[in-house]
Image (cartoon, grey):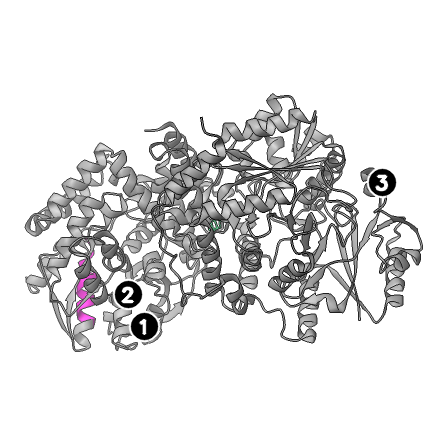
Amino acid sequence: MSDSKAIFLKDAAVNAADGDQRAFIRKALGGYYVNRDLQKARYRDWERARDAASLAKWSAVNDLAAVLEQFVANFERNGGVVHWARDAAEARDIILKIAADNQAKAIVKSKCMTSEEIHLNDALEKAGYGVVESDLGEFIQQLRGEAPYHFVFPCMHVKREAISELFTKHLGTAPTDSPEELTMIARRHLRQLYVDADIGITGANFLVAETGQISITENEGNARLTAALPRIHVALSGIEKVVRHLDDLSVLLPMLATAGAGQPMTCYNTLYSGPRKEGECDGPEQFHLVLLDNSRTRLLADPEQRDALHCIRCGACLNVCPIFKNIGGLAYGTTYQGPIGSVITPHLRGLKQWNHLSGASSLCGACTDACPVRIDLHHHLLHNRRNAAKEAPTLFDRVFHHGFNFVIKRPWLFAAGGRIFRATLPLLQKLPLPYMGAWMKTRDLPEAPARSFRDQWKNPDA
Amino acid sequence: MPDARSDIFARIREALKVKAPRPHLKGEPVAGKTSAAAKPWLPDGGESAEASLAILAEQLAKLKAMLIRVPDHASAAKAVAELAAAKNWKKVAYHGHPLLRPVAAALPCEAWEADASFEKQRLEGCDAGLTTCESIVAQLGAILVSSASSGGRALSILPHAHVVVAEAAQVVPDLGSALALAKARHGDQMPSMLSFITGPSRTGDIERILVLGAHGPKELYLVLVG
Amino acid sequence: MRVSLFVPCFVDQLTPQVGLATAKVLKRLGHEVEFRPAQTCCGQPSFNSGQWDVAREAAVRALGVFRGAEVVVGPSGSCVAMMRQFYPELLKGTPHAAEADDLAARTFEFSEFLVKKLGVTDVGAKFAKKVTYHDGCHALRELRLKEEPRRLLRAVKGLELIETEEGETCCGFGGLFSAKFPMISTAMAQVKGGALARTGADYVVSSDPSCLLQIGGWLSREGKPILPLHIAEVLAADA
Ligand code: SF4
């Protein structure tokens, strides 16, 4: 068993048994469901809008080289500098070098999952920079020394009392149980940090090829401030974020907000096309964009699952996922949690180590229905399982399924086996058998009937 | 060793040798430019100016943004002055736009034209930022500001309140129209920042409970002339 | 019509009454019903475990079993989804592809068959109980059945249908998932079972016997006073 699997099984079991936490997460998501449905109802045809969103992404991803080239040419024409990173280490080095070249000291970051993916904060801190996460949820997680629980709602699992304690400990503020007051504490604390920072680091939600702009979606205004006040703006993005046309955003931005947060649009959707231009009174002097592969091209090379690169990271699939809601986001041990994380992590970080995430699903399909860009999420979990069975078969599975197949190939053996199974079921239930023992721990089986369906059909009156 | 850029492009070209089918669609395949074709499926932005204004008012109310409708520019200046008095604003920073100078002049408090010499610290100390905008999207209640129309990047985000003065004619039905308008207006000389502002800054990070004014303005006012 | 019954393997062995009830309703509606005893398991356990080569064998066998059948009707959204959605995927690009598509077009889930294919909603059943309905995920999301079973239930004399919270939430069965990840599966059963028990219904009815195994197993262990029942059994009831 891989380490990641052992840790997953342990954490998932503990969390799944934590009824309080589960109720807390459900309550937290309650308002989201209501708002999402209200906003979806405003669409004149949500299903067809999903078609358009998925086509916009499909069309860019399947012509990625040309679309990226167009984007980069326009981005550079606008005065930005593009850097390419094959993997996480290269991306970190690029950003460290930008910081060193500019004698930076303080760095402020707005929410960026790609930076979590490359463990940027650790690298910057080790190199001696002060790094502060400015998104409230990320700020709280940074103080907690914990990875984000949900890639859109990073600290949705933390109760306000814990946040109050955290702030008292780190910021010396008086305890309070008001979310409003807690938010204001963070606001006051972070304001000066934007003003003082040399570098602002953001992510990017979309790269617009037609215009060379990057689009950033947020609610708090921290990304706006991060890209406005420091003298250098560094954006970090996966190469798959590119779209062809500016107009594609007329579909993608509202759908991202509705699917992910139950909003018509998030508060701020901002397009950046370079550093401060002549005649503009503020804005950074330099604008860098780091474009990251980090195994995305591996996923691209799989036509069956290529659509996973359409993901706009809205988080909708997590919000409806019964697995996520029961085990929580941290148990996954991945940058991207929930269904999309279970689909892509085996591609990004190795099938052998991460396939258990594809197994940990009842394949209910709620994620696929929720996805605004129609990624075939739960079927991809099946594809991962198939690929894993081929690449790294487990002996138990092979024996079990071939054995089962041996029986079901032979109807007489199936019938005879069934008879024995039914007759010995009361005994079997008491034995510590694999699978069955696990079932019996929390659930009963129906009493075995004396005669099977096929027997009764053949001999109705016996 | 080849540089990262050529390596990544080589990987992409290699990966795309095998084509992926178009995604499963619910409806008939959409012809031509997909996103434009999506217009009739997205939320309604109104077929007439009047309908758009009604939708805008409704959206802004839901977003907890304040819409103040006034008949002319003189009343706009008066409305903003009243607002400043009611809110007890001490310092208001404004964008030096011909539409805004008379509004600023009528303010009952200190008014600072933030364009000329920009100081972050001074702006941080302002109670409100006063800007114009590029357009207003009825469909979503979104106001498009830019580094050109709002005096740079910070003026519309750093002060605690944001006041936008605009003409009713700037209201467009939907997001697609606003994007098209920006493209038509700026061509390949886009302002370095274009930002759709949809309500006052907010967060739900603590127990998913909505709090306004996370980092950006807590209050957003749209003063619409005409 | 001549209906060939597709009785899932565990229904055959553990809940034969579901198969019998299915046949009873179809016969009552005047159809001829056959059961081809060469059928065993559709191969879904292996398919879901990634053992597609094994599942492919099962699929090819099923094609043989049901060759020539006018329509195939199964009382399980999950097993029918296997035949209808996943056989074509499994056999794509093999010599069996065309036959898999053909079988898929002739295979129906029981409630779907009654409502969509036969256009029947009132099968003449009487069942004076309070019931709530559980949508199996495969029926709901692979086969897109939601209204069909409800229309059938609403037409049953004396029956009171109550909707539940967590209506579209998975029960946590997921085949071998329920045993490979028992803690997660149990947590899901608690959420689902808890909501079902709170409805105050006498029975939780579903068109998916596998969900009923999970839900019923948990309800029974927890001593909740609500019993699992397959929709075919409700529709077969006439007293
Ligand atoms: S997979 Fe789909 S639903 Fe999940 S985060 Fe990505 S876009 Fe959203």
Q: Residue at x 19, y 72 (%)?
A: C26
- Contact (Cβ within 8 Å) of mark 3 with mark 2: no
Amino acid at dot 1: Leu
Give the side of residue A204 with respect to residue C48, left or right.
Answer: right
Q: Earlier in the sequence, mark 1 or mark 2?
A: 1
Front-most of C107 and A196? A196
Name above or below for residue C102 compared with residue B161: below
Q: Are marks 1 and 2 in contact (CB under 8 Å)?
A: yes
Q: Which residue range is magenta in the image?
A: C13-25
Residue A335 image point, x, y percent: 49, 37
The three-letter amino acid code for the residue at tag 2 is: Ile
Kindly identify the amino acid type of the residue bearing the numbered disc 3: Arg
Q: Which residue is mark 3?
A: B122
Could you tell me which quadrant the N terminus of chain B lies in?
Answer: top left
Which residue is at the front of the view, A196 or C181?
A: A196
Look at 65% across and 24% down and name the residue there: A100
Indicate the secondary structure of the residue bearing disc 3.
Answer: helix
Q: State which chain disc 2 sits on.
A: C
| Residue on which disc 2 sits | C231
| C178 vs A230, nearest the viewer | A230
Mark 1 C-beta to ligand 1 under 8 Å: no
Tell me the crowding category of disc 2: few under 14, some 14 to 19, or many 20 or more residues within 10 angstroms, Cα based.
many
